[in-house]
Image: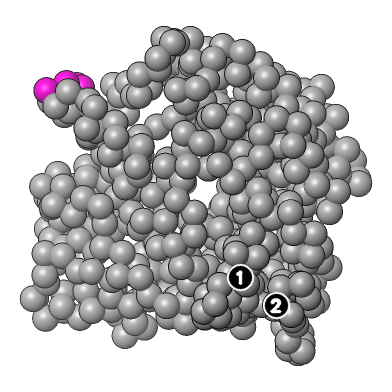
Amino acid sequence: MITPRWLYVLAGATPRSFGDPVVIDESLEAFQPDRIRPGDIVGIGIHTSNAHRGYELGRLVRRRGGIPVFGGIHASLFPEESREHGHAESVVKGDGDLIWQTVLSDWLQRRMKPVYDGGMVSGADFASARWDLLSRKSYMWASVQTTRGCPKHCSFCSVWRTDGQLPRLRPVSAVIDEVVTLRRMGFRFIALADDNFYPVTMHDLSVASKLQDRSRYEQLSSILAQRFSLMKELSRIPASDLILFTQVTMEAAEDPDFLKAMHAARIRGALVGVESITQNGLNGIYKGFNASGEALVSRLQTFQQHGVYVLGSFIFGLPTDTPETFSATADLADRSGMAFAQFVPLTPFPGTIDFENWEKSTVASSRGSDKAPVTRHWLIPTEQRPKLYIPHPTMEPDEIRIRTQQVWDSFYSLPKIWRRSQCASRLRWRMAFLLISKLYCYMYARTGIATDSARQSLAVRWARLIAKPCIRLFSAKPMKELQPAPKAQPLNPIPEAFASE
């Protein structure tokens, strides 16, 4: 659905003197080992869910005489595991934008190190993607990153630990140039693939404005001003059919000026982490800043009132969940007016507080299959992994799985999808909304925790079938002559009440 940005960023970080790298996205095409020649360097990016396959590829590359180098969030957390199971020559931790060139230089001189630490580079050093290496007909949406890091500390998320809590903002001009490049290629829909597009809240500014030391307030004000400046420049790109999507916290609903700027910038959709509809559930995952109950419905509707449609994300399996939580969540998702929703099981991913607590409470001798402990579930072949990992105090795993699937089926029933498609103004786009809704459901629900392998295979076939017309519907005629608009005057978006204190 969306371009795998990091593949093309690392291609952009590769010096031209090395030639054009071969880019392979295994969600579209299988890696061909016979392309590897002895001595070739092969970068393999992994996250926890695909680490098992990544390690398999590393071993395969070794057998062909190639040199595997691992990177990505999972390799950053477990560099020694990548060397043991993936036969990595080297592992790159952290950001690869700058350190990748060093790795390649060391490879050329045959002096590679076991581990390279790229750290957290500044926004000015973010590498631009080599979109010229991309096949336009392979993806529905393009992706551009404008910032890394998130100031929150949700227990189920590792971003604030791996990418930091201080937002690192990319220069506005670099973002605009990349968006324009992608629209030239014929991409109308672009995801602003950020950890948190709304990194400074009204509450943050209010608290900082009362501090005797003004440095914190000035820092936050500068970050917010840059966000508004970016949205202003996005609004001035002379491509009226451009549509953007991003990810924000629910607190953005408290900031009408920010929502107005998002809409003006053509940001028509946002993934919003709702997680739980109860305050107890939110408190348990360190997300007490979210609203719950009817206040939650009101906040979600606020996004829609400003022309920003929500993809709501919910977590099932929290200790505070009851059988009634599932139907109540489905009802709230319907009443809130969100355009899309996802319902995911509580999963202990490495780098998170939830994982650390789960790992400590799990008996060390507990084993999965393939002689891997369940606390290293990513080393277990996908089809043999447990469906759920964290025991629930009152419900069995099967009950959670079945009830989760029922909520997916309810939200993505054809009558409800068609009703929600009224957000689109033309019949063609209502049909596109219906197709993309079904595609999303097949990709994530029908291949998820409540389905067996036969149904998963069927869902994959349906997803591939639906994806083909979706790509045609979401593409547009290339605008090869498109240029960024001249830079506008800077804005002062800080509310007067704060600016005057």
- Residue 456 seen by the camera: no
- Residue 432 in the image: above or below residue 383: below
Quadrant assignment for the C terminus:
bottom right
What residue is disc 2 on? Answer: 501
Where's residue 145, x and y in %?
54, 66
Where's residue 343, x and y in %?
57, 29
Q: Earlier in the sequence, mark 1 or mark 2?
A: 1
Q: Is residue 454 left or right of residue 466?
A: left
What residue lies at 66% left-to-right and 16% top-to-bottom? 327
CA separation in Å, label 1 and label 2: 8 Å
What residue is disc 1 on? Answer: 210
Crowd rating for badge 2 (residues with CA inside 10 Å; few <14, some 14–19, many 20+):
few
Of the pair 308 and 466, the residue shown nearer to us: 308
Q: Looking at the image, do the residues carrying marks 1 and 2 touch, with CB atoms under 8 Å apart? A: yes
Where's residue 469, x and y in %?
70, 42
Of the pair 190 and 463, the residue shown nearer to us: 190
Q: Amino acid at mark 2?
A: Glu
Start and end of the magenta stretch? 365-370
- Residue 159 in the image: above or below residue 134: above
Q: Is residue 141 left or right of residue 71?
A: right
Q: Amino acid at mark 1?
A: Lys
What residue lies at 11% left-to-right and 72% top-to-bottom? 112
Q: Main SS type for the magenta part?
A: loop
What residue lies at 25% left-to-right and 52% top-to-bottom? 77
Q: Determine the residue located farthest toward the left in the rendered image.
A: 111
- Mark 2 element type: loop
- Mark 1 element type: loop
